[in-house]
Image (tube, helix red, strand yellow):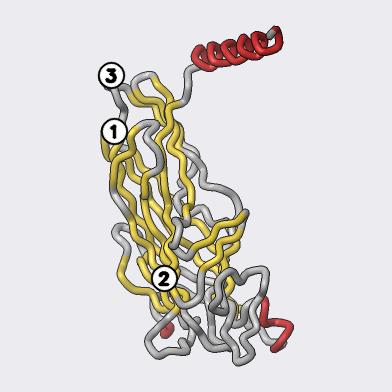
Amino acid sequence: MKSKLGFLVAALGSAVLLVNSASASTFSLSFETSSGWLADGLNYGGYAAQTRSRNGVETEYDCVAGATDALNGCGLSFYNPADGIAMGYTSVDWGNPVTAGQFSGLDVDSYDGVLDADAGWVDTGMITHRNRKVRSGSKTLSEINLYTVFDIVSPFIAQRGAAFGISFTETFNNQYGICDPSIQFTDTPCDDYFNISGVPLPIEFTYDGKKYVIEFRLWGAPGSGFLIEDNLLRTAEGSDNDLLVQARLVTVPEPATIAVLGLGLMMLSLRRTRS
């Protein structure tokens, strides 16, 4: 059984790097990423939490390693091997679909790109939840691990990677159309949700005498289907829901700069008080 590590998809741990190079007017770095759902033993339940009190049945499965139901024994189907990640796949399906061939599942895309210092957020990857109708009693996802690698490839080389857990609840579409009102946010029953904890951790480093931080966040773009509130991710039923993993490169102000800024604010405050 996998532990619940929180939805820290691109949080690759806090790192401190010391690098020296020639000065540059604007600092940029190039990155490459790779992510995959791990088919190395997954735990999920046969019923969503909202249906336990109604049918009185729930089965917990501790799956063995394997990309197919014949190997893992849990009804999970993994496909499209992830680049450079052992037992990692970019897609996973589950459940007995109401419409033949339309499986619920998760996909992950990995992006390469450039981070410019203090220039805003950049997409580093995308998670897609294919939220489809599944029949009550289906074996459905409860927990899964996503392994993500973030490589800095220029102007220096560094790599950080980690596996993080995702906790998921499938709200089944039963004949009564009963859904959890606290989760439902669209007109089509029944929306699903992910429970998350924590926030992505930054990568700290020093380059050419200046300190920088790479920060990460999860971003549900308008119209993407993902709705992020506190530690809850909700996805719309009957649609593809895209969740972006983003990063930005931030310059850490030097202590002298912070002191001067603080002095300026204090003088401004005094000036307002005297006036």
- Name which of mark 1 and mark 3 comes first in the sequence: 3
Mark 3 vs mark 2, CA separation in Å:
45 Å
Q: Quadrant of residue 59?
A: bottom right
Q: Which residue shows up at 40% across the image and 42% down it? A: 121
Question: Residue 247 at x, y = what percent?
Answer: 41, 44
Question: Residue 160 at x, y = what percent?
Answer: 40, 44
Q: Which residue shows up at 61% across the image and 71% down it? A: 184
Dot 3, how many residues are within 10 Å of its Cα: few (below 14), some (14-19), or many (20+)? Answer: few
15 is higher (above) or lower (below) than 47: above
Mark 1 vs mark 3, CA separation in Å:
14 Å
Quadrant into which the N terminus falls: bottom right
15 is higher (above) or lower (below) than 123: above
Q: Which residue shows up at 48% across the image and 47% down it? A: 217
Mark 2 vs mark 1, CA separation in Å:
37 Å
Compare residues 227 and 167 and report the one nearer the observer: 227
Dot 1, how many residues are within 10 Å of its Cα: few (below 14), some (14-19), or many (20+)? Answer: few
- Name which of mark 3 and mark 2 comes first in the sequence: 3
Residue assigned mark 1:
156
Secondary structure beneath label 2 = strand
Compare residues 170 and 188 and report the one nearer the observer: 188
| Callout 3 amino acid | Ser
Cβ–Cβ below 8 Å for labels 2 and 1?
Answer: no
80 is higher (above) or lower (below) than 270: below
| Callout 1 amino acid | Phe
Question: Residue 146 at x, y = what percent?
Answer: 45, 60
Q: Nearer the viewer, mark 1 or mark 3?
A: 3
Question: Residue 175 at x, y = what percent?
Answer: 60, 92
Residue assigned mark 3:
23
Q: Nearer the viewer, mark 2 or mark 1?
A: 2
**Is residue 189 visible in this depiction of the protein?**
yes
- Name which of mark 2 and mark 1 comes first in the sequence: 1
Residue assigned mark 2:
240
